Structure formats: structure tokens, C-alpha cells
Amino acid sequence: SGKTTLLNRILSEEHGQRIAVIENEYGEVGIDQGLVINADEEVFEMSNGCICCTVRGDLIRVLGNLMKRRDKFDYVLVETTGLADPLPVAMTINDLRDQLRLDSIITLVDAENFNEEILNSKIAKAQVIYGDILLLNKCDLVSEKRLSNIEKELNDIKTSPRIIRSVK
């Protein structure tokens, strides 16, 4: 859907923010390590599974360790696997609400590969329902009619979602 591309873009932009990244590397292409070094960002990789369900304790531990270094960053960005239910991650962050505030959950929707099978997935529906922002990506690869149909289907899952169309 473009999650890692988006993450690399955020890390390479000149926005003046220091971002700590917790990245799930489980079977996915990770952050460009050269880019991260050049961007002077801290990256915490968790390679032992989906951070939202099987390593909740690790997520709490990593966030706790980050809080000890609070002066080193302005924001924490958690990139989960595309198969993750965002609710447990949000609940974990809520457990640390005296130290952290959940700003938003961004769900990337791949316009090119969106289909009925994905639409019927429990996890995909959870990602749409809990997403504050639905980033409809790869809009340059499909027709306007297809984009409108996808947006209608997303509206059937979540009433009046905030959908932002994007390319790359």
C-alpha cells in the first residue's frame, strides 16, 4: 500500500521534527537505513512479529525506554504490519497516556489492489474503522470511476471517513 514509502518520505522531509520510529520488520521491506542515518532519526526495529498483537509487552517496553530519552525526539511513529489491527496499538499508547498522546491512526488503502476479498477482511475493516485518516494511495494507477467506487465502499464501512487521495 506504500507504508514504508510514506515513512521514508516523512523521514526525508525538511520539517524540523525529530521522530522516533518503532518499525515492524516482520516480512516487510524496512526503512532505508542510509536515509535514517542521514535524517538523524532513531529507529527501533521489532522483528519478532506484529507489534499490535503478539509483542504488546515489547511495545510497552520500547515506548518506556523511549520515554527515558524524551529529550531526543518530538514524535513517535509506529509503523505496524499491513495485517495489524490498530486497536491494540492505540490501547497500548492509551495505557501510557500520562506520557504519550495518540495523535492519529493513518490507514493506507492501496487503490490499485483494492478488491472484494480485502473489503471482506476483518483486519482491513478494523483498519478502516479505526483510521482517523484513510490515505487512498496509488491514485495515479486507477481511473476516477474506480477511485469513486472505492471511496463509496469505504463510506459503507465507516460513516464520513476523512479520505485523502495520494500518489506515491
Image (tube, rainbow, N blue to C red):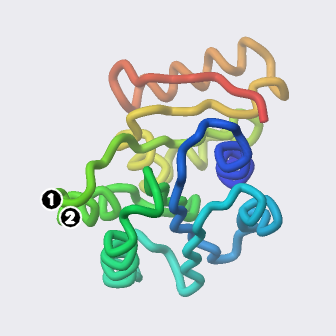
Q: Amino acid at mark 1?
A: Asp
* Residue type highlighted by circle 2: Leu
Provide residue 113's location: percent of width, then percent of height.
73, 42
Residue 122, relative to residue 9: is it above or below? below
Give the quadrant of residue 162.
top left
Q: Which residue is mark 2?
A: 96
Front residue of 71 and 8: 71
Q: Is residue 124 above or below residue 164?
A: below
* Left or right: where 155 falls relative to 31: left
Identify the residue position indicated by label 1 in the image. 98
Q: Is residue 151 left or right of residue 4?
A: left
Residue at 61% in and 36% down: 15
The image quarter containing residue 159 is top left
Gap between marks 1 and 2 measured at Cα: 5 Å
- Residue 129 at what x, y percent from top left? 36, 40
User: Do callouts 1 and 2 mark residues in contact (Cβ within 8 Å)?
Assistant: yes
The image position of residue 32, as x and y in percent, is 79, 63
Q: What element does badge 2 sit on?
A: loop
Q: Could you tell me which residue is drawn at 44 percent across and 57 percent down?
A: 76
